[in-house]
Amino acid sequence: MTTIAGTGEQGQDRNTGGQALKVGLNSPWDLLVRGDRLYIAMAGHHEIWVLDLVSGGLVPFAGEGSENIRDGTLDQARFAQPSGLATDGRTLYVADSEVSAIRALPLDGKG
């Protein structure tokens, strides 16, 4: 077993990333691999993060960090404990637990 992300302590910073082993995670609830990217439903941050499995870079992918339901661009959308991920190869589907919704995000980042 090998840790690929997280410090072992709960992260508090929602808006920055960095090298995956130096970034504290906050309640990662689900994972989805697509190519060299690992998408993380970060329930505690109310965001979706992405880990580049080649470079080790970990950054927020979608959500601005406030707990609520709001559609919009990836950086302005709001989630409330995203907890499940699935894809059809073009769209990332998110089970957004606290607002009882299924959300859809473009995997190309143009949303």
Image (spheres, rainbow, N blue to C red):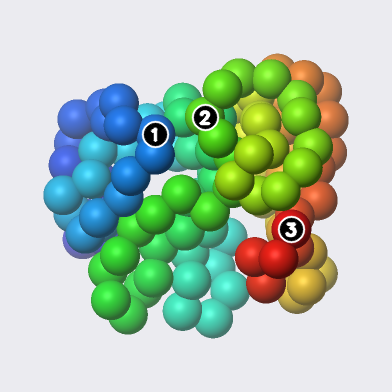
- In the depicted structure, whether residue 106 falls above or below residue 45: below
Left or right, residue 64 beside residue 87: left
Report which quarter residue 10 is drawn in: top left
Q: Residues within 10 Å of mark 2 (few under 14, many from 20)?
A: many
Q: Position of residue 7 (x, y in %)?
A: 17, 42
| Residue 90 seen in the current view | yes
- In the depicted structure, whether residue 73 falls above or below residue 58: above
| Disc with the residue nearer the chain's start (3 vs 1) | 1
Name the secondary structure under disc 2.
Answer: loop
In the rendered structure, are the residues bearing label 2 and label 1 in contact, judged by CB atoms less than 8 Å apart? yes
Q: Position of residue 107 (x, y in %)?
A: 68, 67
What residue is shown with label 2? 65
| Disc with the residue nearer the chain's start (2 vs 1) | 1
What residue is shown with label 1? 14
Q: Position of residue 98 (x, y in %)?
A: 70, 18
Amino acid found under the numbered disc labelled 1? Arg
Residue drawn at the location 65% of the way across and 65% of the way down = 109
Tell me how far mark 3 sits from mark 1, CA to CA: 19 Å
Instruction: Assign the C terminus to one quadrant of the image.
Output: bottom right
